[in-house]
Image (cartoon, rainbow, N blue to C red):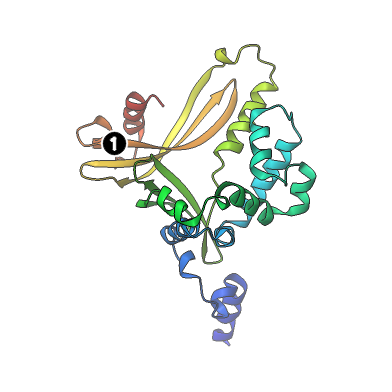
Amino acid sequence: MRNQFVWLVLVVLFPGVAWGEEVDPAQASPKAVVQATFNALYDSDFDRIIALTHPKSKEAYSKFLMELFASNPLDPVVAHHKQQLHPIDTKEKVSQAGPDAVLKQKYENTFGVIPKKQLRESTPELEILGVINESPERAHVITRAVTLHVIEETCQKVDGKWYMLLDDEVPRMWRHAQAIHEKHLPDLKKVVSKFESAKVLGYVPDGKDHVQALCRIQVQVAGIPFEELSCFSVYKGELAWDHLDDKDQTELIAALRERWGI
């Protein structure tokens, strides 16, 4: 009876595990799903990329597009996204198409017109510096495409499978701008940005005597609270280096603010 009870709990909490469902190796870890997504881009396999993208992240992207396309058509951000998503370029068409079709249209318009060989040759090789686990279900993969900046890719775990989250920088920045605009500020150059707090989520090595520290920063712009994730380089010999492992991050954050102006 006890064994039957344990099995019932497994079925309820972890249905895939209980029934012996195999997890796609590409979704077995944050690092694996990021690498698989990048490989799929190399192969112009947009369906594969979409399958590896978190469903709620795709829904959030479609919601952003519907907000965007319902706003001022003369806004450069609106015009750019209409071109990028054509012919799914109205609020109604986005709603009718659904998140997967919307995302596939974006990839086809952006990368589908490039021959696969040319895409491979023009896309820098991916280097994964390391993984920072924020929680058992959320991780940040720190990457660099050779010659380019360090980029943080966020992954989410659901039912034992890891998914990529879409970059939300453009939606976040656009909504920030809308919120500021709604305050009817006469001169955006005079908008005051105020630092609120910061937390270093972790760091990964980036060569010898050099790490990338991932920081969640909270600020207020025109009195409106905003949050963002950023990577900062820390070299041996810098003040921040000696405080990377401090439990109390007060001195670490102060050093990063002095070095990078956050």
| Image location (x, y in percent) of residue 191 | 57, 16
> Element under label 1?
strand
Q: Which residue is mark 1?
A: 234
Is residue 243 or residue 140 the one in the foreground?
140
Query: Residue 99, percent across and down?
Result: 68, 53
Q: Is residue 244 left or right of residue 39?
A: left
Number of numbered discs overlaid on the protein picture: 1
What residue sits 53% from the left and 34% below the top?
Answer: 227
Please name the amino acid that badge 1 sits on: Val
| Vertical order, 74 against 156 (above or below) | above
Please tell me which residue is depicted at 28% across the width and 33% down the height of the picture. Answer: 240
In the rendered image, residue 103, in percent from the top left (x then y), is placed at 63, 51
Task: Say which of 256 and 32 sits in front.
Answer: 32
Label 1 crowd (10 A; few <14 / some 14-19 / many >=20): many
Q: Position of residue 183 (x, y in %)?
A: 68, 19
Asked if residue 197 is positioned above or below residue 50 in the image, the reply reads above
Please identify the quarter of the rendering in which residue 65 is found: top right
For image coordinates 45% across by 59% down, the residue present is 39
Residue pushed farthest bottom? 1
Residue visible at 60% across and 76% down in the picture: 11
The answer to whether residue 130 is left or right of residue 223 is: left
Q: Quadrant of the C terminus?
A: top left
Q: Quadrant of residue 75?
A: top right
Position of the N terminus, as image quadrant, is bottom right
